Image (cartoon, grey):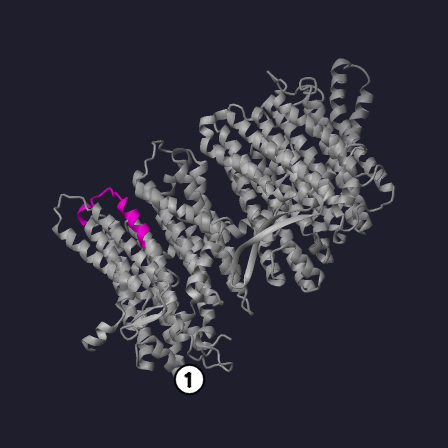
């Protein structure tokens, strides 16, 4: 199977081409084309994965381009990481294709949506089987294009248009770093091939400063794609796209591409302590930073978006702490539970036609399938024991501890507390209590939407058991097999870490319950037994006040401080760059006044400048 | 020169030029004797056939060894062959665009002139690519320039077109004067106009004053010729002229004329200055000692072109600045002087030819239909004509250098060429990367119009067959050379032997 793995990305490509050509005639039947082709990819990917369990890495390539005496190759590779990614991507894509059939029903650009989904899936699958940096870069850009088209899908909305543009440009800024790093690596190692780059690194052919520099530049690319601080701002805005797109691209696959890139180049990063440290610090900071912003958001998708940013920060922290397995493991579990959360959120939005959680409430009784599934996702992301997120988050914390990053470790623990808190705040505000606004015609989504969620729900529970300290670390051992550069399959850590992690997540849930679950209880109680015990009420109120004073205000303060950083420092920087650029452009076009005398003068002045420099330097610049 | 020597020359190597000359003459006679009422469109097809015939005869000459006749005023070396190929393919496509051109105000009566002036311009460009003497180089340059001045003013009753021609001719004269002044210095120092003899003579110049004068000549020639490239400091005419000229002429100026500019630049700079000493201690050739100045111009051109393009609303002006920026990228090739400079230049010019002409074919169609050149005319193109919109998107992506397109491979080659020499041109490469990022803004601005804006006018679009052909060929080539660039490089290496005969 593995020697034919190149066929996997071609199925969605075919779907894309087919739908672009005949979509208009097929109308809503386009969905079946997309679903069938991605199903083919999924089946093939699973077969390849099982093949890879028993056989060694497979790689095939041929010469693509010759420049001077340099030869560039193109081909594909199936190693452990690639095989795993193939299954994750094609599975989520297949489920999203299915789900969209219900969600996008009635949209008059239905076939176009499916065509774009096909294009994106093709690019993403192509990205994960690339054996060299150049090919990766090619698909990396194509993935960006697919994301651009899908975010801007509702192009008649101003915000969607702006978000599409912002996403494209912000990630492009990161891509410049990637491009420079890639070219420098090529210059140093003489090849874009991963294997040859690693060989050159191991043989000491590249100076350690250069390794650090290129690793950090490549990480800049990953920062852009994976929405890490300070290039994260596009990801929450990208929620303007249709919700299935958010699940596919902005939760499970494309944003994980940055993490994947760092994992794929892991031997390069481990060769430089500074680069690893950079990755870890950015990751941990992003994790807590985004989580704290998530505490106060009111839009259901934005909360999930910030939580994605935060979870990606966790993965980066893991990789930066030399926890290769932990990073990849969390990438996998996160893909499942976050895609589930987004699809469930989509189902909620589908039912109530608003994204503002202030207007929701009491949906548990009305959405009998979506509610429990959303709860499963929330439990998994909060790291409640026995759910998948618990095991992978535990691995990350252990890795950070074992690598000696004590400060980062505690940051991650606090972020875990925040995560549990804001996720349950979201859950209680949406599902608990009673509806805060009039909601008519609230009904459960059709089964074409709920079935994909059920599949993800099952995975969000069981996916963790492939790598646990209790039943064996199968995934970890397999991932690092035959490759000592990737570190150990399992890192031993003190047992108290697991207890602390559980404790903070339960504490977060409890707090959320007190504030958002309980408060609505108190309101019931108040209305029914108004004249009774003011004191108790007062005390309750006092507790709430106390919590909101300490925890919420503290968090609000941190988040507004970070928000301040974001608005004034990051956006200011971005704005000033664009401002300078456009004012230079304005200046230039002022010169272009249509007066032909000016044109001639400019030419002569140019000549004069050259001659004057020539005269002053005695003719030689060197 | 007696008749016998004249007859002994191998005239066969000039076949492509003779064909173009013959067709130009025939077209002018046909125009003279054809009844006034008859459409001149047929002349366009005759011209197209002539260019194809010249192309075929050129392909027949590809295996021919380097040869020079008429006292070295006409050379047929690999460089000439490879770049003539680009000129002819570009011209054939521009002719196709021109036959599909239906301006709103009457061009009909002058249409005949259009075609044979076009042929004359092409002939000038071809002479330049195959000349080994300053006099013939200059004659070729003027033949191209003067024909282009008239072409720019072809829409005689349109004020913009008149203004465009006027500005073009005045700026062109200034540029010619500067170039010629520079050439006169070189002539004065060497006493010959033959490039090869000049090169031989200059190897033995040791007088510092002479070397200094030679340096001044270098600057004047570079600045003068930058007019043809539309590069800084002689770029300012481009937006006004591009906007006013008829669209096929704009396409011609931005592709064929620019290619010709690079041809003459390479011919003169690398023949004369590659062997001249620069007078410094390490005995560097002059061209290496002065390459930083070219780099300076390249950087300035990239910055100016890309930044000002951000503020354009008129699609032809936008493409004028884009073409300035592209000239800047191409100057990076000359400034970095890597071993595979010719290959890189050839490939990028070829890729640029296809992506730019494809884009111009679409621009002509869209702007003509609505009568306005504002980029809002592209709004909702995807709904009206999905094929046009997707093709345009691919051309824009290629111009922006996104992977998967020929433009990306071209830029990749330029990067490699600039970084491979021992002292890599980091600054230049950084400027190129930064300005490329800037260019995404305006290229994507057009894409946003096409895909994300509602259409103002929803009429169905019918594309003339000639334009469809140009768009189809450009599209195929842009993708093919982006996915399998080795086809082009194998052809180059198989037939032109690394351009080693350039200096012979």
Assign the magenta stretch its main secondary structure.
helix
* Quarter of the picture holding the N terminus of chain A: top right
Residue A350: x %, y % from top left: 59, 24
User: Which is more toward the observer, A194 or A146?
Assistant: A194
Left or right for B37, reference B118: left
Q: Which residue is mark 1?
A: B208
Residue at (78, 27) in percent of width and height: A514
Residue A143: x %, y % from top left: 56, 43
Left or right for B126, reference A137: left
User: Which is more toward the observer, A295 or B280?
Assistant: B280
- As for residue B106 lying within the magenta part, the answer is yes
Q: Is residue B133 visible?
A: yes
Secondary structure found at label 1: helix
Left or right for A2, reference A517: left
Indicate the quadrant where residue A564 lies: top right
Residue B343: x %, y % from top left: 45, 62
Indicate the quadrant where residue A268 lies: bottom right
How crowded is the residue under tag 1: few (<14 C-alpha within 10 Å), some, or many (20+)?
Answer: few
Which residue ends up furthest to the bottom in the rendered image?
Answer: B207
- As for residue A547 lying within the magenta part, the answer is no
Q: Is residue B234 visible?
A: no
Q: Which residues are magenta?
A: B91-110
Residue A418: x %, y % from top left: 74, 37
């Amino acid at each position: 199977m593995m020697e034919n793995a190149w066929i996997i990305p071609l199925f969605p490509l075919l779907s894309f081409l087919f739908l672009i050509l005949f979509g208009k005639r097929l109308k809503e039947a386009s969905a079946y084309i997309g679903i069938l082709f991605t199903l083919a990819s999924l089946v093939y990917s699973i077969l390849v994965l099982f093949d890879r369990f028993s056989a060694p890495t497979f790689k095939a390539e041929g010469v693509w381009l010759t420049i001077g005496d340099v030869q560039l190759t193109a081909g594909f590779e199936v190693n452990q990481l690639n095989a795993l990614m193939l299954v994750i991507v094609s599975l989520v894509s297949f489920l999203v294709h299915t789900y969209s059939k219900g969600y996008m029903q009635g949209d008059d650009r239905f076939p176009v949506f499916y065509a774009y989904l096909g294009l994106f899936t093709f690019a993403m699958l192509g990205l994960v089987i690339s054996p060299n940096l150049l090919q990766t870069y090619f698909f990396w850009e194509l993935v960006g294009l697919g994301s651009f088209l899908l975010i801007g899908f509702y192009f008649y909305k101003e915000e969607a248009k702006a978000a599409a543009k912002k996403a494209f440009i912000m990630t492009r800024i990161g891509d410049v770093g990637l491009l420079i790093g890639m070219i420098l690596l090529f210059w140093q190692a003489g090849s874009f091939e991963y294997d040859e780059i690693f060989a050159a690194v191991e043989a000491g052919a590249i100076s350690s400063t250069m390794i650090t520099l290129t690793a950090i530049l490549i990480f800049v690319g990953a920062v852009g794609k994976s929405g890490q601080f300070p290039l994260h701002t596009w990801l929450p805005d990208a929620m303007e796209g249709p919700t299935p797109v958010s699940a596919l691209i902005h939760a499970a696959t494309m944003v994980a591409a940055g993490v994947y890139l760092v994992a794929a180049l892991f031997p390069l990063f481990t060769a430089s302590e500074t680069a690893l440290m950079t990755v870890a610090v950015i990751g941990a900071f992003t994790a807590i930073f985004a989580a704290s912003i998530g505490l106060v958001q009111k839009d259901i998708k934005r909360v999930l978006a910030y939580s994605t940013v935060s979870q990606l920060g966790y993965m980066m922290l893991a990789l930066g702490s030399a926890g290769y397995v932990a990073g990849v493991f969390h990438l996998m579990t996160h893909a499942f539970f976050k895609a589930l959360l987004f699809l469930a959120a989509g189902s909620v939005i589908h039912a109530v036609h608003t994204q503002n959680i202030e207007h929701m409430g009491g949906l548990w009784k009305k959405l009998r399938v979506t509610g429990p599934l959303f709860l499963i996702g929330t439990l998994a992301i909060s790291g409640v024991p026995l759910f998948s997120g618990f095991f992978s988050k535990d691995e990350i914390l252990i890795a950070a501890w074992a690598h000696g990053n004590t400060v980062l470790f505690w940051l991650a623990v606090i972020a875990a507390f925040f995560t549990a808190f804001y996720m349950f705040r979201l859950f209680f505000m949406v599902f608990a209590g009673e509806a805060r606004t009039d909601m008519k015609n609230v009904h459960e989504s059709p089964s074409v939407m709920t079935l994909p969620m059920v599949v993800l729900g099952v995975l969000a529970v069981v996916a963790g058991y492939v790598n646990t300290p209790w039943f064996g670390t199968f995934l970890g051992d397999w991932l690092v097999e035959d490759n000592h550069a990737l570190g150990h399959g399992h890192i031993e850590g003190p047992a108290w870490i697991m207890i602390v992690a559980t404790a903070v997540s339960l504490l977060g849930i409890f707090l959320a319950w007190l504030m958002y679950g309980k408060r609505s209880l108190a309101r019931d109680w108040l209305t029914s037994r108004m004249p009774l015990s003011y004191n108790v009420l007062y005390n309750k109120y006092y507790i709430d006040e106390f919590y909101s004073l300490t925890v919420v205000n503290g968090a609000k303060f941190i988040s507004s401080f970070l928000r301040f950083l974001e608005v004034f420092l990051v956006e200011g920087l971005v704005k000033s760059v664009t401002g300078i650029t456009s004012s230079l452009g304005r200046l230039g076009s002022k010169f272009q006044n249509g007066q032909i005398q000016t044109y001639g003068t400019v030419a002569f002045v140019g000549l004069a400048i050259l001659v004057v420099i020539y005269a002053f330097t005695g003719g030689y610049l060197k | 020169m007696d008749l016998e020597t004249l007859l002994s020359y191998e005239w066969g190597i000039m076949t492509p030029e003779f064909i173009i000359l013959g067709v130009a003459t025939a077209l002018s006679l046909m125009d003279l004797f054809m009844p006034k009422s008859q459409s001149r469109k047929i002349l366009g097809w005759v011209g197209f056939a002539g260019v194809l015939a010249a192309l075929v005869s050129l392909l027949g000459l590809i295996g021919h060894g380097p040869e020079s006749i008429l006292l070295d005023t006409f050379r047929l070396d690999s460089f000439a062959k490879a770049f003539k190929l680009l000129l002819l393919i570009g011209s054939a496509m521009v002719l196709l665009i021109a036959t599909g051109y239906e301006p709103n105000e009457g061009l009909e009566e002058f249409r005949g002139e259009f075609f044979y002036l076009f042929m004359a311009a092409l002939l000038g460009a071809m002479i330049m690519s195959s000349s080994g003497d300053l006099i013939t180089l200059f004659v070729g340059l003027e033949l191209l320039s003067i024909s282009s001045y008239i072409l720019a003013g072809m829409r005689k009753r349109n004020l913009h077109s008149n203004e465009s021609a006027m500005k073009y001719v005045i700026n062109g004269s200034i540029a010619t004067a500067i170039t010629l002044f520079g050439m006169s210095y070189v002539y004065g120092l060497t006493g010959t106009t033959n490039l090869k003899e000049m090169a031989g003579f200059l190897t033995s110049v040791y007088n510092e004053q002479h070397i200094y004068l030679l340096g001044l000549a270098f600057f004047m020639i570079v600045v003068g010729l930058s007019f043809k490239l539309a590069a800084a400091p002689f770029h300012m005419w481009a937006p006004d002229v591009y906007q006013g000229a008829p669209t096929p002429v704009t396409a011609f100026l931005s592709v064929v004329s620019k290619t010709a500019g690079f041809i003459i630049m390479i011919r003169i700079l690398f023949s004369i200055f590659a062997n001249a000493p620069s007078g410094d201690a390490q005995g560097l050739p002059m061209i290496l000692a002065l390459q930083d100045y070219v780099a300076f111009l390249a950087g300035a051109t990239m910055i100016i072109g890309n930044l000002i393009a951000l503020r354009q609303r008129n699609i032809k002006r936008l493409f004028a600045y884009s073409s300035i920026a592209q000239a800047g990228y191409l100057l990076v090739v000359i400034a970095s002087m890597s071993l595979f400079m010719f290959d890189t230049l050839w490939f990028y010019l070829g890729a640029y030819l296809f992506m730019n002409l494809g884009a111009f074919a679409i621009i002509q169609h869209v702007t003509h239909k609505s009568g306005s050149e504002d980029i809002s005319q592209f709004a909702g193109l995807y709904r009206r004509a999905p094929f046009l919109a997707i093709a345009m998107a691919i051309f824009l992506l290629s111009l922006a250098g996104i992977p998967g397109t020929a433009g990306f491979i071209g830029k990749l080659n330029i990067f490699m060429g600039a970084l491979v020499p021992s002292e890599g041109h980091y600054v230049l490469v950084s400027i190129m990367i930064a300005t490329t990022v800037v260019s995404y803004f305006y290229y994507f601005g057009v894409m946003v119009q096409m895909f994300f804006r509602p259409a103002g006018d929803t009429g169905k679009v019918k594309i003339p067959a000639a334009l469809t052909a140009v768009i189809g060929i450009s599209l195929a080539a842009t993708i093919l050379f982006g996915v399998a660039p080795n086809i082009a490089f194998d052809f180059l290496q198989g037939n032109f032997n690394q351009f080693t005969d350039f200096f012979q």
